[in-house]
Image: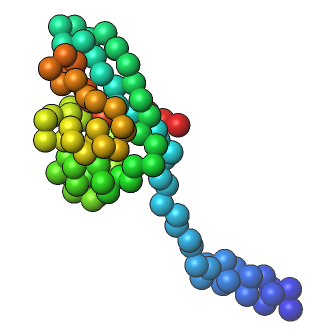
Amino acid sequence: MIKALSDRKQHRREHQTVRVRRFAPKVQRFIRWYEKDGDRLIGEVELKGIKLLALQTLFGEVKSNPMYANYQIFPRQKPFLERFLGIPLQLDSYDYFVECSAA
């Protein structure tokens, strides 16, 4: 009787459904700007409320790319980001990047 009971428990353990959750690290995204002649950080603003899909579309990335790399902001991205942030981007004076940091 004891052996039969332990066999049933073992059978259940072997046939349990394994639930796999995808790990999505928490990140913060920023726009950071640097001096053009050098690499000194001039300023940053956090990108709160912008969806990853919007950034992927803006930078021409596929949906599977989590965009952990740094992306330089060019004139074609400037209007969207200025509307979203409510501040002007001075691309002639500074180099701007969308950057990602662990939260």
64 on left or right of 92: right
Nearest the viewer among 8 and 56 is 56
Q: Quadrant of residue 37?
A: top left
Q: In the image, what residue occupies the spot 22% across and 23% down?
A: 90
Q: In the image, what residue occupies the spot 38% across and 19% down?
A: 43
Nearest the viewer among 9 and 53 is 53
Position of residue 33 measured from the top left corner of the image (x, y, whole percent): 30, 22
32 on left or right of 96: right
Position of 66 relative to 17 (above/below)? above
Position of residue 69 measured from the top left corner of the image (x, y, whole percent): 29, 36
Q: Quadrant of the N terminus?
A: bottom right
Position of 57 relative to 36 (above/below)? below
Residue 65 visible to an observer of this rendering: no
Nearest the viewer among 80 and 99 is 80
Count of numbered marks: 0
Q: In the image, what residue occupies the spot 30% across and 43% down?
A: 83
Position of 52 relative to 34 (above/below)? below
Position of 41 relative to 87 (above/below)? above
Q: How is the image coloured?
A: rainbow
77 on left or right of 82: left
Position of residue 62 measured from the top left corner of the image (x, y, whole percent): 22, 56
Q: In the image, what residue occupies the spot 34% across and 44% down?
A: 84
Residue 83 visible to an observer of this rendering: yes
Position of residue 8 measured from the top left corner of the image (x, y, whole percent): 73, 87
